[in-house]
Image (tube, rainbow, N blue to C red):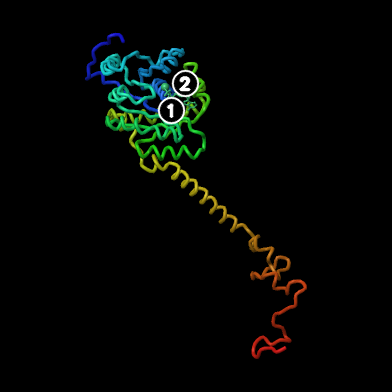
Amino acid sequence: MTQLPDRDPETTPLAQVVVFASQKGGSGKTTVSAHLAVEAERAGAGPVALIDTDPQGSMAKWWNARASDTPAFAHISVPDLARDIEALSAAGYRLIVIDTPPAITSAISEIVSHADLVVLPTRPSPHDLRAVGPTVDIVQHQNKPLVFVVNSATARARITGETAIALSQHGTVAPVTLHHRVDFAASMIDGRTVGEANPGGRSAAEISQLWAYFDERLARLRGDTARLIDNPLKTFDEDILTPVPKALAQLKQSGESAAAAAVKQALEAPETPPAALSSHRFGDVAGQWDGIERRREDTGPPPGKPDRRASASRPAFGKRFSA
Ligand SMILES: Nc1ncnc2c1ncn2[C@@H]1O[C@H](COP(=O)(O)OP(=O)(O)OP(=O)(O)O)[C@@H](O)[C@H]1O
Ligand SMILES: [Mg+2]
């Protein structure tokens, strides 16, 4: 990397470093890190620099296929990471996104030690869940904030929720799930992101929501008081229980309109019995219902059966009738 100017800490803060790590191959480290870096740049949180520490160089290949120059790509080696983060910050970079190989090595541990935030993408599968432990251990050992991102989820699959619950035992789970869609894979092949390939699509919406979450997390981590005052933490029920107050509001609204409709109907309706009862009415002629419900069976015994009820020929009480 070329020599960059010295940084004045008063005027130029250190860039925030987000490290994507997961021992499990194919969990989405490269895909999610590239997407979030582009989205951060697009949302104005840049300049963003990408660092690929994976010898496979998937991120570098994707960046080489890109038409756009942003985010920037920084060639660095892990032993020089501290110096290069300093140099990138001096050059004005505000966010550094680091992709790592699927491994548990001292190099991963070294990279994590420079992180302000570690992101662990996980597919919702038992294999992926079983594999998170060693990565979580490294992050917790370094006492770094950790966020899981559930990636490549199938719509409405029960395992997605179960994965989130299992992961939440070990750290924070991002509130936005990335679903399995071909545009994620396709856009990575031609050096783009889902937002660049199909800006109105659902994958693009997920990425921008996920970035909004990370943007907020990073603002809190750097103690950006101006940002926090502008965007105060919402109330618990708004943030966490959003579907419930919405559902309650809808219920209240529909309850109110149902009650209003019932009152209106009662005021306007002629004085007739409820429709459900009309088929059971007995003794009403031409709508002159006397208000008393009777059972049709009262008209007599079932067809072909003798009438066993008391009759004039049988005393209703007193001595037992003897045959
Ligand atoms: N949400 C998704 N929907 C569809 N395909 C996805 C999604 N996320 C990742 N993929 C695809 O899964 C494969 C693995 O993803 P990716 O390379 O990002 O994982 P990785 O964790 O970086 O893998 P490695 O550990 O080998 O570096 C890629 O082909 C990628 O295009
Ligand atoms: Mg990768």
Q: State the residue in front, 274 or 154.
A: 154
Question: What's under tag 2, amino acid-wise?
Answer: Thr
- Quadrant for ligand 2 reads top left
Q: State the residue in front, 68 or 179.
A: 179
Residue 17 appears in which quarter of the rendering?
top left
| Residue at the outermost bottom position | 319
Question: What's under tag 1, amino acid-wise?
Answer: Ser
Residue corresponding to mark 2: 193
Residue 272 appears in which quarter of the rendering?
bottom right
Residue 168 is tagged as none
Give me the residue at 77% from left, 73% from top: 304
User: Are the residues tagged 2 and 1 within 8 Å (C-beta)?
Assistant: no
Q: How many tags in the picture?
A: 2
Q: Is residue 190 left or right of residue 7?
A: right
Regarding residue 89, the answer to whether it shows in the image is no
Residue 226: horizontal and vertical position, in percent? 29, 29
Callout 1 secondary element: loop
Residue 95: horizontal and vertical position, in percent? 33, 21
Other residues around mark 2 within 10 Å, as few (<14) / some (14–19) / many (≥20): many
> In the rendered view, would you say 299 is above or below 119?
below
Nearest to the eye among marks 2 and 1: give it.
1
Q: Is residue 219 left or right of residue 36?
A: left
Q: State the residue in front, 217 or 144.
A: 144
Residue 218: horizontal and vertical position, in percent? 32, 28
Find the distance from the CA under tag 2 to the CA under tag 1.
17 Å
Q: Earlier in the sequence, mark 2 or mark 1?
A: 1
Give me the residue at 72% from left, 88% from top: 323
| Residue at the outermost right position | 304
Task: Note whether ligand 1 is within 8 Å of mark 1.
Answer: yes
Give me the residue at 36% from left, 33% from top: 133
Residue 27 is tagged as 1
Callout 2 secondary element: loop
